Image: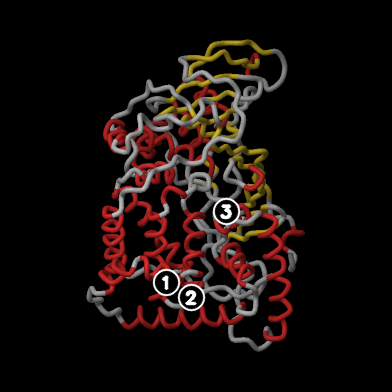
Amino acid sequence: MTYQPLADADLWSRARDGDERAFGELFDRHSRTVYNYCFRRTADWSVAEDLTAMVFMETWRRRSHVRLSGDSLLPWLYGVATNTLHNHRRSLRRHRAALARVRARPTPPNDAATAASRLEAEHEMREVLDSIRKLPRGDQEVLALCVWEGLGYAEAAVALGVPIGTVRSRLARARKRLKQHLEPARTDGPRRTALYTEETP
Amino acid sequence: MIDLQPPARQDMPADRQAAWRAALLTEMTASRRLPVRRLAFGGLAATALVGGVAAALVAVPDGGQDAGPVQVVPMSATQILDRAAEAAGKVAEPRPDQYVHTESEARGDYLPGGLVREQTWYSVNGSRIGLKIEAGERFWRCEAVQRPVPSKTPADCKNQPFYRRDLPNDAKTMRDWLYRSSAVKYVPADVRAYGQAQEVLRSSRLTPAAQAAMFKAIGTLPGVKVVRSTRQHIVVGQTWLGLRAELLFEPRTFRLIGGRSVADNDRSFQPEGSKEFQETLLRGGKKRYGADRKEGTVATSWTIISQRVVDAIPPAYLKDGS
């Protein structure tokens, strides 16, 4: 579990009281993490961009309900992102005006290397998502948060709004099923990757 | 175990990031009407408190020994932190290839059951994989891998050094660094500097000289006072806008053993920048920050149960399977 004493809490307190700069600071601090989490759940950078914006808009809309996990806003943002992924269309309707304004802006093209890197990442991510698609949705969520995002059980429990025991059992079940499904493919699969989890800063 | 990993993280294109940020703030300005509610707070019982005081009676071992008779003397926060600095300076340095093994716990009402215990093994110089065990589950730390890893425990990890040799060894330079290095922009500089010190002390281990410099530097920060001394803890803290950020030391050894955030109505510390911060809060009609928190309520705490230098992660944790 990572810890930032009072930093997010101070900013959130100020943002909730109407300070745009403080909310902007929280956006600067966490949008990259949210953006990449949304990408990892969708394998689409463009969709991840929309979702990231919606996560912060939803956080602001429901600000009276926000509860920080310790001194970090991040578990809450992961929870909003997970819900937004479920209710994508509803969120799109709610924030369509803001989304339309930003989408209407001209976008400078990426350079060739960046474009290739992003396409390659989308391709890789689709492979990863295909490999877990047979898991129940709840198991996929726990897997994404604990293994890909490096959250501890407690943080994942806060993000998903479930007891810590549920997180543990879902992760154990997901691992068991994946092991069964993946073993035969390991000998000739195109991607042999690390068995580590990466902790978020 | 799970062996499919997503591709590396990427940044959102800068122009899009800026556009979304602007849209977000526009949305925020247009819909600023919901009632606000304070952070959920409290949950853990607290002992009776006084605000910061100039000095507390501290039981100090005669002759500086850890055991034996003690004498009770009044000590200021600066004196306590100087003793902590003196104690820190006597600790041996680890080798770069070793690990720092830490057992710790965090408490807070936001945690399921209010308590999380964890063990970590973090590489002294960052060149080896790190491990955190929480609730019996392993979480590996490997911030950068140069190529696909063939085994279940990557051998070519590169992490930030847990043992920080990059920080100043003298108190004045350390103090300057604390004021310079915090990423938080809006709270007053004196509060930022103290928060940065807390963060560094919790999230890393410093060289003896740097840790000594850190404690001495904290002792010079405005608003830092001794809170109280008991048989279990010597507590120093800085109270600002209803919340006291504490550092806890073990009475006999003056070793840092943790930190807490505690509700405190002492308003004597008003650093430069407080007024502007409070004016924003007052726009919401609140009398003051933290007004609805019961004095003495502990919001969060962290405790270092043990910390020692070891040569390696125990082999049992490196075996395949979970």
Tag 3, which secondary structure?
A: helix
* Chain of the residue on which disc 3 is drawn: A
Up the image or down, B167 lies above or below A97; here it is above
| Residue furthest right as drawn | B316
Q: In this rendering, do the residues under marks 1 and 3 share a single chain?
A: yes
Identify the residue shown where x is 67% and y is 72%: B151
According to the image, label 2 marks what residue? A42
Tag 2, which secondary structure?
A: helix
Which quadrant holds residue A137?
Answer: bottom right
Which quadrant holds residue B70?
Answer: top right
Q: In this rendering, do the residues under marks 3 and 2 share a single chain?
A: yes
Q: Earlier in the sequence, mark 1 or mark 2?
A: 2
The reply to whether discs 1 and 2 touch (Cβ–Cβ < 8 Å) is: yes
Q: Earlier in the sequence, mark 1 or mark 3?
A: 1
According to the image, label 1 marks what residue? A48
* Chain of the residue on which disc 2 is drawn: A
According to the image, label 3 marks what residue? A158
Looking at the image, can residue B309 be seen? Answer: no
